[in-house]
Image (spheres, rainbow, N blue to C red):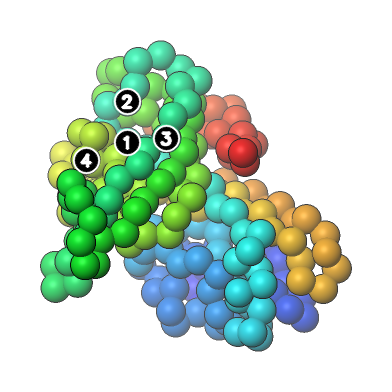
Amino acid sequence: MNGQIIYDDDLITIYEKLPGEDSERLDGSPVGRLDKPVGGLMLLAKDPRYVRLLSESYEKQYLAAVSGGFEGEGIKGSMNDLLLHDRRKNKSFPVKRKRSGVREAELIYEQICRDNDKDISLQTVMPLTGRTHQIRVQFASRRHPLFGDGKYGSRHKGPIGLYACRLSFIHPKTGEVMVFKHRPPNAEPWSIFEDDVITRAIDLSLRQ
């Protein structure tokens, strides 16, 4: 593992995955995965039998730097779509009706700020379902592709603008509600935004 361990005990590890690392090749059983180009916090169970139990209380939030944005600040919303994943192309597509292979996808978000000069906005996002490329395709289908995500139509060049910044779950042994937060690297696209804006985005809980 090339990233850093944030927390470790006899049952779990909280690990900051680096962009380019494969979630399936980490030491431990992931509770929720991250796309290969995406960095951020991951919860790893040392015994795979705990994955299902941890999943029952597990919540994950992301920072997303997206093209354009919504009018104003503090805008909250949800996105609900039917998604079809093409394994051959490794790409997901929104479709109009349910059929074989189509799955429902839902997320909630809040816009933290928008930089009109750079045509970028910062969103805090919580997926309520775990579909392949879900955040990426749901924002892109609304003409707001993630920064650097050429696969889904971004014209901004650079690392993909998605980072898992916040995890919460109930510890399977102690019953304690555990919350972990971590800042993304000080590089594009995150360096576009002021430090206090990034902090506000990480501290904001979208928990319903």
In this rendering, the answer to whether 181 lies above or below 76 is below
Residue at horizontal 73 percent and vertical 78 percent from the top: 11
The image quadrant that residue 16 belongs to is bottom right
Q: Mark 2 or mark 3, which has the lower sequence index?
A: 2
Q: Which residue is mark 3?
A: 78
Q: Which residue is mark 4?
A: 141
Q: Amino acid at mark 1?
A: Val
Q: Mark 2 or mark 4, which has the lower sequence index?
A: 2
Secondary structure state at the residue bearing disc 2: loop
Q: Mark 3 or mark 1, which has the lower sequence index?
A: 1
Name the mark on residue 69.
2
Q: Amino acid at mark 4?
A: Ser
The percent coordinates of residue 141 (x first, y second) are 21, 40
Name the mark on residue 196.
none
Which of labels 4 and 3 is toward the front?
A: 3
Q: For the residue carrying disc 4, how many other residues have a C-alpha within 10 Å: few (<14), some (14-19), or many (20+)? A: some
Q: Which residue is mark 1?
A: 66
Cα–Cα gap, marks 2 and 4:
13 Å
Q: Amino acid at mark 2?
A: Gly
In this rendering, the answer to whether 162 lies above or below 78 is below
In the rendered image, which quarter contains the C terminus? Answer: top right
Q: Mark 4 or mark 3, which has the lower sequence index?
A: 3
The percent coordinates of residue 116 (x first, y second) are 30, 18
Q: Amino acid at mark 3?
A: Ser
Cα–Cα gap, marks 3 and 1:
15 Å
- Find out whether the residues at labels 2 and 1 contact each other: C-beta distance under 8 Å: yes
Which of labels 2 and 4 is toward the front?
A: 4
Cα–Cα gap, marks 2 and 3:
14 Å
Residue 202 visible? The answer is yes
The image quadrant that residue 14 belongs to is bottom right
Q: Observer-nearest residue: 38 or 187?
A: 38
